[in-house]
Amino acid sequence: MKKYKVGIIGATGMVGQRFTTLLENHPWFEVAALAASSRSAGKTYEDAVGDHWLMSTPMPASMAKMVVFNAEEDVEKVASLCDFVFCAVNMKKEEIKALEEKYAKAECPVMSNNSAHRGTPDVPMIIPEINPEHAQVIEAQRKRLGTKRGFIAVKSNCSLQSYVPAIHPLMDLGVTNALACTYQAISGAGKTFKTFPEILDNVIPYIGGEEEKSENEPLKIWGHVENGVIVNAETPNITSQCLRVPVSDGHTAAVFVSFEKKVEMEEIIQRWESFKGAPQELNLPSAPKQFLHYFREDDRPQSRLDRNLENGMAVSIGRLRPDKQYTVKFVCLSHNTLRGAAGGAVLMAELLCAKGYLD
Ligand SMILES: NC(=O)c1ccc[n+]([C@@H]2O[C@H](COP(=O)([O-])OP(=O)(O)OC[C@H]3O[C@@H](n4cnc5c(N)ncnc54)[C@H](OP(=O)(O)O)[C@@H]3O)[C@@H](O)[C@H]2O)c1
């Protein structure tokens, strides 16, 4: 099989670094270009990153000497070297929108980790196990952008990567209300304990914009395609609170859900354990064999023990029990920079490759 040449826009950042490690030995994708801000442009990747390498494995040797492009000025050059790009940059929303559209219009599809285009109705926001069919809107988006190949696809916010997959196999029970309190790792803010000492012995009860994303993005994921756009679902009614906690990686959520129909706890567990989506059926390279794992032990899932399950691509669930206000409550966990960011975007790209959108 031909290897797709890919670029990483924002390669020097926390998510960008994660992309380099995930793509180093990828069977389908080969990194052909790295890009970041003017601060990094023109330097080798290792010089641009300097002592800000945040991964636990070494920088991929094949990329250390690559010269970093200027993401904003070298669009044509990067597009000519790449079949598509991954994008994770720290810029203003309008700047990100414009940057991603520039790549798409240069006929270079964009797999985005940024939130800028998540609300754009013809930009699919894909969790590959849940809504792969939303890729259909790409044709309408290409018409709007005037492109043949170029388009933008986004992945959702990391906060909801545990509870949306957990609720999804239960949707036909008539999910009316859901409450999710998230306990989010510091890598979600691009930080480590070294760069974020004020989080030690502390909980910070505010993450800018996160509760809005946690409540609204699931409705796009559960939406349907109509006339070339995604029409958001109207239910469930979701409320959330998002807290930053002293954990390096892994977002946990305490979740409460109400159903219209009656259901036994064992049936819910069985639905989770047997749930499969397109990535498992297509045997995509980054797909977890089992997406949802249920732990029967009272003290699981735990961030340190369970975040890396199936290479950080699975979701761990535990503590399912009936609730006296909602129907049930449970706890779930997903790795925020793997499934919740770079890994989720790589899996989305694999899905879009398998479906022919990146040819
Ligand atoms: N961390 C997570 O878990 C997570 C999860 C999901 C989504 N995201 C999203 O992913 C994006 C990146 O997050 P991060 O944590 O990786 O941020 P980060 O560590 O601060 O990295 C930001 C990256 O953006 C680049 N950049 C900044 N200004 C730029 C410009 N004007 N032109 C081109 N590149 C520019 C930086 O390049 P220089 O090094 O050259 O400045 C760097 O490569 C954000 O939109 C974030 O919301 C993050």
Image (spheres, rainbow, N blue to C red):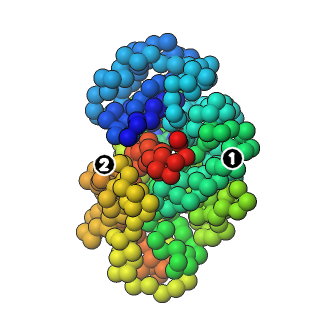
Horizontally, residue 238 falls left or right of residue 334, namely right
The three-letter amino acid code for the residue at tag 2 is Asn
Q: Is residue 51 visible?
A: no
Residue 140 location, x and y as percent?
A: 70, 50
Sort mark 1 into few (<14), some (14-19) or many (20+) by Cα contacts within 10 Å.
Answer: many
Give x and y (percent) for residue 308: 30, 50
Seen from the viewer's position, the closer of residues 344 and 164 is 344
Specify few, some or many for label 2: CA neighbours under 10 Å numbering under 14, 14-19, or 20 or more: some
Q: Amino acid at mark 1?
A: Gln
Which residue carries the number 2 mark? 311
The quarter of the picture where residue 270 lies is bottom left
Image mark count: 2
Q: Secondary structure under badge 2?
A: helix
* Residue nearest the observer in this picture, 313 or 208: 313
Question: Which residue is drawn at the image coordinates 61% and 55% (left, top)?
Answer: 136
Instruction: Answer with the quarter of the image where residue 93 lies.
Output: top right
Q: Is residue 183 left or right of residue 230?
A: left
Q: Nearer the viewer, mark 1 or mark 2?
A: 1
Res. 222 mark: none
Residue 164 in sight here? yes
Residue located beneath label 1 in the image: 141
